Image (cartoon, coloured by chain):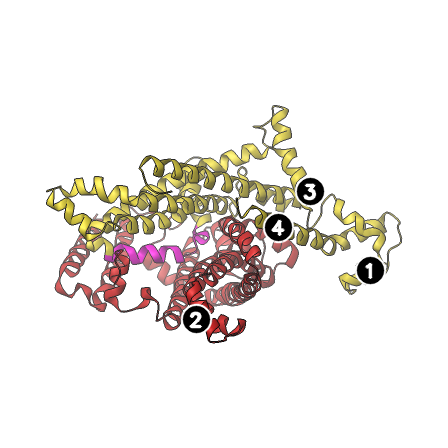
Chain colours: A yellow, B red
Amino acid sequence: MRSLLPVLTVLGILVAIWYLAVAPMNLRGVLDQAERAGATVIPEGSVARRDVHIWSLILDNRGHVAAVYDMKRPRLPTPVQVGGELWKTTGEMAMKGRAWSKRSLIYHGWITLQSTLLGFLLGTTVGIIGAVAITYSRVADMSLMPWAIISQTIPIVALAPMIIVVSNQVGIEGRTLPKAIISAYLCFFPVLVSMVKGLRSPRLSQLNLLRTYSATSAQSFLKLRLPASVPYLFTALKVGIAAALVGTIVGELPTGAISGLGARILIGDQFGNSLAIWSALFSAAILAGVLVTALDLAQRGVLKYMGMRV
Amino acid sequence: MIWLVGAILFWAAAWAINVWLANSRMSDTRAVTVLVPVIFGLSLIALWEGIVRAFNVPPVILPSPTMVAATFISSADILWQDFRQTVVKGAFRGFMIGACAAFLTAIAIDRSVFLTRGLLPIGNFVAALPIVGIAPILVNWFGFDWQSKAAVVVVMVFFPILVNTVQGLRETDAMQRALLCTYAAGYLQTLLKLRLPAAMPFIFNGLKIAATLALIGAIVAEYFGSPIRGMGFRISTGVGSLSIDLVWAEIVVAALVGTAFYGLVAWIEKRITFWHPSQRDRASRYLIQHGREP
């Protein structure tokens, strides 16, 4: 809680910058509208205005500046407009009992959440299995690890449209699975790296101690290596779920999807509805925050239960 | 069928060689550490080729590696043009602008403990967000050419580098700063001689994350509109017109560029942070990886 005040201050600064940016971003559009409505604008004609610097436009047309904060289709909406749109498409629709309507962000968020969780599960499983293989087999360590690193330098987005087209042709119905594969691709790497670190974290003396107890290698895995890796695992899971969400949204963006938060961004772009884009972006951010917080709470609970320092 | 059996045999043989190499006495030599993953990669490509040929997979679903290689060579001029548009103009310029902006912001913010405390949690949170989503907005603001791609890259690389730099600048302990104080070193001298060098491992960590993000940003932004060249443009139109071999050739380019870019940053890091424990000789690096102090 010590950092609450600084965080709020920085947030305040960011919002202030945002508000200041709204006027120069939107003014030209406002002036065009005002001129069509018959108001006097200096200079006249949008072509003539194109050569005038934005700051002198603001100075010359001070009467119109207030209108930039209340445009219907702004280039840059204000935080209040975004918040209003967000409420309109979530809370307000939920209160009317239309939470699962196709226009509600709750519905689209749910679609995105499904693939995110599926991809997260897939990626985490692959990551943990890979880490166990790498810890116990020197060949796996030497041959898999470099490729795991290289796989993350390959931009998965290049593959995203293709994964979806191919899985369509192979006969996989729906988009949940292909999107989840993209999520899993982004999510497995942090889990793999952290789990390798975690499984190797017991000291040699600890491993030797178990050997003096004549523990089998399965026993020393279950009783020493696995518990020792739990703190590492949770740190990785928090990174991994955020990566899985990014993966799902990337999977929805370029591929003509019709539901999901990424699809809302895409559709908002096609219809020139910037408010829809911004509200979808913010609900993705909120979703990421909720998921990471949930894992953080789980981490605290589990580590406390295991008697580790949180 | 002969193709499938051959590919599986090749894969098994490669795996056997790798097992032998990894357990032999030479397993710590540099040649073997490079050779083992290369053999593994080759065996995967052979498996891919064998499966495509054995089951007659149509090229619109999955072209064989030889076909991709042939397309790569025959359309080298298209690939080169796309590379220049997306990587050199979009990703690289955006990366440079974003890295410089993040670095300068970090230095500026670092002077205030209050702002640093507020910025770190926010920056960490923003760095985890799906920022690629702003691509359509920025394409709308900055037009179809490379400027909008560079803008997306700037926003994507900014926060990881900022957070890591700020974190790195806090790395020195009071004793070290007090020592420089006894030398009567000013703010600038302390920054240049102590705090920036100490922050370098963190800064490079951020740069490495950003290196992979830069390419993603530049490619995604092209899905939302671009002049008729660029890797993202070629991929999205290639998928539409079912010229999947060309798409795979672009993916190969993307993979090569991504790996090379990352490798370049890692190479520079090695030159600059040679003093850091993780970069010292192989033996101590091994010990650190396995959780022990050298």
For label 2, count other residues whose C-alpha is less than 10 Å away and answer few (under 14), some (14-19) or many (20+). Answer: few
Which residue is disc 3 drawn over? A80
Q: In the structure shown, which secondary structural element does the residue marked by tag 3 occupy?
A: helix
Cα–Cα span, label 2 and label 3? 50 Å
Residue under circle 1? A59
Within 10 Å of disc 3 (Cα), the crowding (few <14, some 14-19, many 20+) is few
> Which dot marks residue B119?
none
A185 vs A288, left or right, is: left
Q: Can you give x and y, in whole percent of width and height, for residue B102 in the image?
A: 54, 62
Q: Chain of mark 3?
A: A
How far apart marks 1 and 4 lie (CA) works out to 29 Å
Residue visible at 41% across and 46% down in the picture:
A240
Disc 2 + disc 1, Cβ < 8 Å: no
The amino acid type found where label 2 is placed reads: Leu
Identify which residue, B106 or A286, lies in the foreground: B106
Badge 4 amino acid? Thr
As drawn, the label of residue A9 is 4
Q: Is residue A140 above or below residue B104?
A: above
